[in-house]
Image: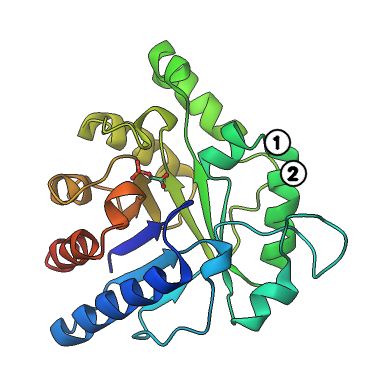
Amino acid sequence: MTIIAANFKTNHTRKSTKEYLETVSTFIEDNKFENEIYIFPTATSLDEYKTVPNINVGAQNAYPTQKGSFTGEIGTEQLDEFDVKTILIGHSERRHVLGETQKSIASKYEYYSNLGYKIIYCIGEPLEVKEAGLDQTLTYVWEQFEGIDVNYDNLILAYEPVWAIGTGVTATTSDISNVHNAIKEKIDKPLLYGGSVKVNNIKEILNVPNVDGALIGTASWNAVDFCEIIKISNNL
Ligand code: PGA
């Protein structure tokens, strides 16, 4: 079953998230689509949404705590209010823009895996590493698994080259398959591709062997485009 995930980043309000989820849910219900869908709204837009069962609403980020003194963060007490049991960990913007280290990412991973959360764990190399070649890229990617229990049951991986995120530059199918094949050889978990995935390239990307789905930022923010992506991926 193809897995399609939408990362809203710092986009949409609670009101527009509600409308979005209604649109996507109705579309899935009307067409009886069966893809596994994950949607990550902003923390302020989490709520008790009624969706079709194959839509799972998750958190883009949370601190490894139930509650406490961690200004600006949320913990499981806030996630439990909305029955959120899915979390994105290791996204490139949290690593490279917000400065999360592998050590802090690994402790967040340990905390949420101990609680049984569904984790979408992201890895991916910056441009200078990609330009240094495949060996360097894989070395960089393996380092992003440091402290990560890859045998965790409730794990989905997402390979997202940093240079392809939000840039409109998509990795070529051979870039994708080189890294996906190498990861799949070692880790038997669903593996998504992310980085400028759009309506017009989703089919080609999902047809690459060892690509089990896509994690989509920009193109997911528009409900009509996201529905189109769901439709294309469901028919593959
Ligand atoms: P993008 O973002 O689709 O805008 O490139 C992907 C992501 O960051 O998950």
Q: Residue at x 41, y 66 (%)?
A: 39
Quadrant position of residue 108: bottom right
Q: Is residue 144 visible?
A: no
Q: Number of labelled discs?
A: 2
Quadrant of the image containing the N terminus: bottom left
| Label placed on residue 104 | 2
Colour mapping used in the image: rainbow
Residue pictured at 47% horizontal, 35% vertical = 124
Say which quadrant the C terminus sits in.
Answer: bottom left
Q: Residue 106 or 71: which is nearer the viewer? A: 71
Q: Position of residue 183 (x, y in %)?
A: 44, 41
Q: Residue at x 27, y 30 (%)?
A: 169
Answer yes or no: disc 2 within 8 Å of ligand 1: no
Q: Where 89 sits versus 65, above or below? A: above
Point out the residue furthest to the top here: 132
| Dot 2: element | helix
- The kind of residue tagged 2 is Ser
Horizontal side, residue 164 vs residue 96: left or right: left
Residue type pointed to by label 1: Thr
Who is closer to the viewer here, 222 or 55?
Answer: 222
> As drawn, is 43 to the left or to the right of 197?
right
Rendered view: 126 above or below 76: above
Number of residues whose C-alpha sits closer than 10 Å to that of mark 2, classed few (under 14), some (14–19) or many (20 or more)? some
- Front-most of residues 185 and 173: 173
**In the displayed structure, would residue 144 be above or below residue 77?**
above
User: In the rendered image, which residue does mark 1 sit on?
Assistant: 101
Q: Secondary structure at mark 1?
A: loop
Q: Is residue 44 visible?
A: yes
